[in-house]
Amino acid sequence: MAHKKIIWSSLASHQMKAVLDFYIQRNGSSVYSLKILNEIEDLSKALSENEFIGRLTSNKMTRVIPMKVYLIFYEINKNQIKIVSFWDNRQSNNNLISVLSQNPIQ
């Protein structure tokens, strides 16, 4: 199976950056944020090689992969995999439903 290109929606990029920035500010160092970023890169590589590693969600279009306290939601089309949300599980689930319903893959 060919590797698919991973792209991040602007929302998912913003969410990930907010998490990384939070830990930089809180810890006064980028060490932990770089650790998270490395884990995201490893997971992205695995996803690129096997697009079905995530569990299908109830909407039947979006898949999810857990990563510590985060959920990475993505959607697949024939040319690419789009990360639609980088969700911190400590947030309200109502916000998540709203985010996912407003950001279908294009």
Image (tube, rainbow, N blue to C red):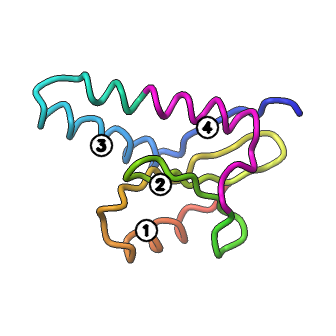
Question: Do the residues under discs 4 and 2 have CB atoms within 8 angstroms?
Answer: no
Mark 4 vs mark 2, foreground winner is 2
* Crowd band around label 1 with a 10 angstrom C-alpha radius: few (<14), some (14–19), many (20+): some
Q: Answer left or right for 21 relative to 35.
A: left
Q: Residue at x 81, y 40 (%)?
A: 79
Question: Do the residues under discs 4 and 1 have CB atoms within 8 angstroms?
Answer: no
Tag shown at residue 7: 4
Question: Do the residues under discs 1 and 2 have CB atoms within 8 angstroms?
Answer: yes
Query: Over which residues does the magenta segment extend?
Result: 38-55
Tag shown at residue 71: 2
Residue at numbered disc 1: 96
- Give the CA distance from mark 1 to mark 3: 16 Å
Mark 1 vs mark 2, foreground winner is 2
Q: Amino acid at mark 1?
A: Leu
- Residues 43 and 61: in front is 43
Residue 31's quadrant in the figure?
top left
Quick one: SS at disc 3?
helix
Q: Amino acid at mark 2?
A: Leu
Quick one: SS at disc 2?
strand
Quick one: SS at disc 4?
strand
Tag shown at residue 19: 3
Q: Answer left or right for 91 relative to 39.
A: left
Q: Residue at x 41, y 52 (%)?
A: 70
